[in-house]
Structures are given as structure tokens and as C-alpha cells.
Amino acid sequence: MGRRKSWREKLYDAQGLPKVTPLEGKLRAKWGPGTLLVPSPVEILEIMQQVPPGRVITQEEIRQVLARRHGATLTCPLTTGIFVNIVAWASEEERLESGTLLAPYWRTLKRNGALNPRFPGGQERHRHLLEREGLTVDTRRKTWRAADWQQHLWVPEA
């Protein structure tokens, strides 16, 4: 059995991505006619790197920006979520090894401002990093949310 890839190796392993394909079969039944973008991890990284301090972006916003850039109907939500997590873990890996940060991953939220429990340190660390930048986190439910995320939303140019 071979050695496991590091998070940074996973981040830079494009595997023929990005690619735009027609929506067919179950995907077409779910989303209708059009095209689906499967982004590359580096495209996700590049957007996450741009989010300014005290601002946030959602995975949905990232998907919309990438779909526009590639002329696709939509961007795959599953791969986007996976690649956001790879960026987070690769960033932590880089920070621990060299003291530099690839991207301020904590500024990326899930749908409706939800914190990402799969980020390094889970919701607790995600909360701490957001609050350090002036956001408020609502912890009254199982899924914690940035209470004021819409006021801090940042959307990049396409």
C-alpha cells in the first residue's frame, strides 16, 4: 500500500479538472437541462484566498462565481464542498509546517451561514476564528451559524 497524499498534494492534484459536462440522467432530472462544472481544487483555493478579513463567503457563492466563469449552468455542490475542506486542511498543514497560511478558510461558510464541523478544530475553532474577526456565532442549535453572515458577505467579481 502506498503513502497517503498530503492535503497540499490533494489540493494541487487537478485530475483533469475543471471540466464542464452536460447534465444527463439523474442530474438532469434533479436540476433540469444545462451543464455542470466540476471545479478544480485550486480554483476554490483562489477564491478563498481573496476573502478579506471580517468578511465571509458561502460555498453557494463560490459555486455561482465558478459557474459564471466557466459558462456552466451550475457547479457541482459535492465536489465544491470536498474541495473547500481540502483547502482548509491544506492551509492548516502549511501553517503547522511553515507558519504561512494558504487561505483564510474560516471565512468560508456552508449554506445559510452554517459553520463547517469538518474544518480543522471543528465548529469550536471555526467559531473562534470568526469571532476574532468580529462576527457573531449563534450556538443555540446543533449546527452553529454566523448570526450576522449576510452583513459580512463578500462576493468576488466573476
Image (cartoon, helix red, strand yellow):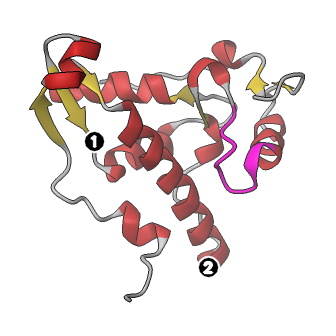
Give the dominant element type of the magenta stretch: helix, strand or loop. loop
Q: Quadrant of residue 101?
A: bottom right
Q: Distance between the residues labelled 1 and 2?
A: 27 Å
Q: What amino acid type should be assigned to the residue bearing mark 1?
A: Pro
> Looking at the figure, which quarter contains the N terminus?
bottom left
Which residue was labeled with disc 1? 39
Q: In this view, does 157 lie above or below 46?
A: above
* Image point (46%, 23%), residue name: 60
Residue 79 image point, x, y percent: 37, 42
Q: Does the magenta stretch include residue 122?
A: yes
Rendered image: mark on residue 97: 2
Q: What amino acid type should be assigned to the residue bearing mark 2?
A: Glu
Residue 59 image point, x, y percent: 49, 30
Q: Is residue 47 above or below residue 137?
A: below
Tell me the magenta residue range: 115-123
Of pointers 1 and 2, the one earlier in the residue sequence: 1
Q: Is mark 2 on a helix, strand or loop?
A: helix
